[in-house]
């Protein structure tokens, strides 16, 4: 009898084992959340004192918070780098456009069998069907082929079908609902959800949680005021919380990687309190105020909890990192500029960056470009300006005189000169163009130009 029971137990284990192995080998779901115009200083977990971000703080407490993530100074340039893993110098055409010939991480995920979706802000070309062309099975987007309202009474496009809302609906809520529906529909298979949020971009207007929310708004900038920015940050955090709670409710939290970041710095007309001091937003500038953003990676049971990593991260690094997390091979022909930080997310040493390179021109023109290479301590522009980031983190003082540098500093300068030299001819000839004069970014601008 004892032997029979042991045999039955062993047989039961053999029958169960394949499903256990299959579950263990199942690629993880990935949810990439990117807030709009949200600098590093806005998140309480980072030391922000002005805004309430409990849901994002919880992701940080239960995951890894990266302290040194830099992206591009405005929206489209960051989106292009993030989706292609290439520096803007190689493939950035102009504001609001992604080269139709570009290869994206979403295309690789789709080829690997993932269900894929994008929900939120598009701004990567107005030709119908582009989201699907770039590898997204499903899409719910604002600013795809048109530019209607985004907050109260928005115009959105669901899988390329235009839908206009006129009964006080709130755009971020509709997009969040679409995202949660996608998660529900694909909870039993690996999925990739890219969620580039509408919040917290100006105009700073009331949210549905604000006492003065206007469900009858018919213009983009009705009721705008800087005081509403805090309300928008709180609502953005609430929307992140909805996604996390939904994943929990479906019982797939342990199978789901959640990554949160910002797409560029906070608008320059907002001054927040950061670690007890005023911090002016710097969107559009090539300093930390315009490029330093929050980054959190969370995956229970895999990513260590309550860890802080200060390795340098760049927008081009997300493509290879997402693929590494999912076990997806990247064709060598793509020759990405990015490098994976997935090992660091798992709590391992990894291979940290020694430098970052940036080529930025919002309209793609040569006259507008700002090009530099940087280590943690120093930053060298193509035009020769050198800044000591330890003593002058926001580049407010005069550049250092290279003739007065010590041997150690000269060694760093040589390293950065070599980096810049390696990108000297990286801009394709077909993309070389003069560009328009630089615009001042110390005051609110035309919304189309500041997206």
Image (cartoon, rainbow, N blue to C red):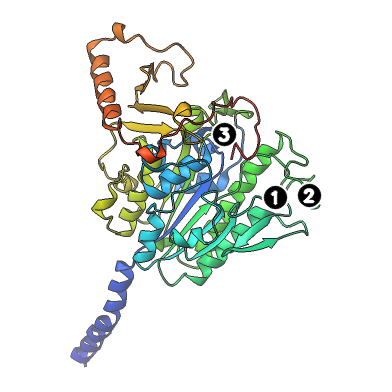
Which quadrant: the C terminus? top right
Which of the marked residues, 2 or 1, is nearer the chain's N terminus? 1
Residue that appears at 68% across and 42% down: 231
Are discs 3 and 1 less than 8 Å apart at CB? no
Element under label 1? loop
Answer above or below: position of 167 versus 4: above
Q: CA distance from mark 2 to mark 3?
A: 25 Å
Depth order, front residue of 282/431: 431
Q: Quadrant of residue 201?
A: top right
Q: Mark 3 against mark 1, which lies toward the viewer?
A: 1
Where residue 68 appears, as percent x and y from the top left, is: 40, 34
Residue 306 seen in render: no
Which quadrant: the N terminus? bottom left
Which of the marked residues, 2 or 3, is nearer the chain's N terminus? 2
Dot 3 crowding, Cα within 10 Å, few <14, some 14–19, many 20+? many
Are discs 2 and 1 less than 8 Å apart at CB? yes
Residue furthest out toward the top: 404
Residue that appears at 47% across and 21% down: 394
On screen, residue 215 versus residue 128, left or right, reads right
Q: Which residue is mark 3?
A: 266
Are discs 2 and 3 less than 8 Å apart at CB? no
Element under label 2? loop
Q: Which residue is mark 1?
A: 149
Q: CA distance from mark 2 to mark 1?
A: 8 Å
Q: Which residue is mark 2?
A: 218
Dot 1 crowding, Cα within 10 Å, few <14, some 14–19, many 20+? many
On screen, residue 109 versus residue 153, left or right, reads left
Q: Mark 2 against mark 3, which lies toward the viewer?
A: 2
Q: How many marks?
A: 3
Where residue 319 appears, as percent x and y from the top left, is: 36, 50
Depth order, front residue of 123/171: 123
Residue that appears at 61% across and 33% down: 50
């Amino acid at each position: 009898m004892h032997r029979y029971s042991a045999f039955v137990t062993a047989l039961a284990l053999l029958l169960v084992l394949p499903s256990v192995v299959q579950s263990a080998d199942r690629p993880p779901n990935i949810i990439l959340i990117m807030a709009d115009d949200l600098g590093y200083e806005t998140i309480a977990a980072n030391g922000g004192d002005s805004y309430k971000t409990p849901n994002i703080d919880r992701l940080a407490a239960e995951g890894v918070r990266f302290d040194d993530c830099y992206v591009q100074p405005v929206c489209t340039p960051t989106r292009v780098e993030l989706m292609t893993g290439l520096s803007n110098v190689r493939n950035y055409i102009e504001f609001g456009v992604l080269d139709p010939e570009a290869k994206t991480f979403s295309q690789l995920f789709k080829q690997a069998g993932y269900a894929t979706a994008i929900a939120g802000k598009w701004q990567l070309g107005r030709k119908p069907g582009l989201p699907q062309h770039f590898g997204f099975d499903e899409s719910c987007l604002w600013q795809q082929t048109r530019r209607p309202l985004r907050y109260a009474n928005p115009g959105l496009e669901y899988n390329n079908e235009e839908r206009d809302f006129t009964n006080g609906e709130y755009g971020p809520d509709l997009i969040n609902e679409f995202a949660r529906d996608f998660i529900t529909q694909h909870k039993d298979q690996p999925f990739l959800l890219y969620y580039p949020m509408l919040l917290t971009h100006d105009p700073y207007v009331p949210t549905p949680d604000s006492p003065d929310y206007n469900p009858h708004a018919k213009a983009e900038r009705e009721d705008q005021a800087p005081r509403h920015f805090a309300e928008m940050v709180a609502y953005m955090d609430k929307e992140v919380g909805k996604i996390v709670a939904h994943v929990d409710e479906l019982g797939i939290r342990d199978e789901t990687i959640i990554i949160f970041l910002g797409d560029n710095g906070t608008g320059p007309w907002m001054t927040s309190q950061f670690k007890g001091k005023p911090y002016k937003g710097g969107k559009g500038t090539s300093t930390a105020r315009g490029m330093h953003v929050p980054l959190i990676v969370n995956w229970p049971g895999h990513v260590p909890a309550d860890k802080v990593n200060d390795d340098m991260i760049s927008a081009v690094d997300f493509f290879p990192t997402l693929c590494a997390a999912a076990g997806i091979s990247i064709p060598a022909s793509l020759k990405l500029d990015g490098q994976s930080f997935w090992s660091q997310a798992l709590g391992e040493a990894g291979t940290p960056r020694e430098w970052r390179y940036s080529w930025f021109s919002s309209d793609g023109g040569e006259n507008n470009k700002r090009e530099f290479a940087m280590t943690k301590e120093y930053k060298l522009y193509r035009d020769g300006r050198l800044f000591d980031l330890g003593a002058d983190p926001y580049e407010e003082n005069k550049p250092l005189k290279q003739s007065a540098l010590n041997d150690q500093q000269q060694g760093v300068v040589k390293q950065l000169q070599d980096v810049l030299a390696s990108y000297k001819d990286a801009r394709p000839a077909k993309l070389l163009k003069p560009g328009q004069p630089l615009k001042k970014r110390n005051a609110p601008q035309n919304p189309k130009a500041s997206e």
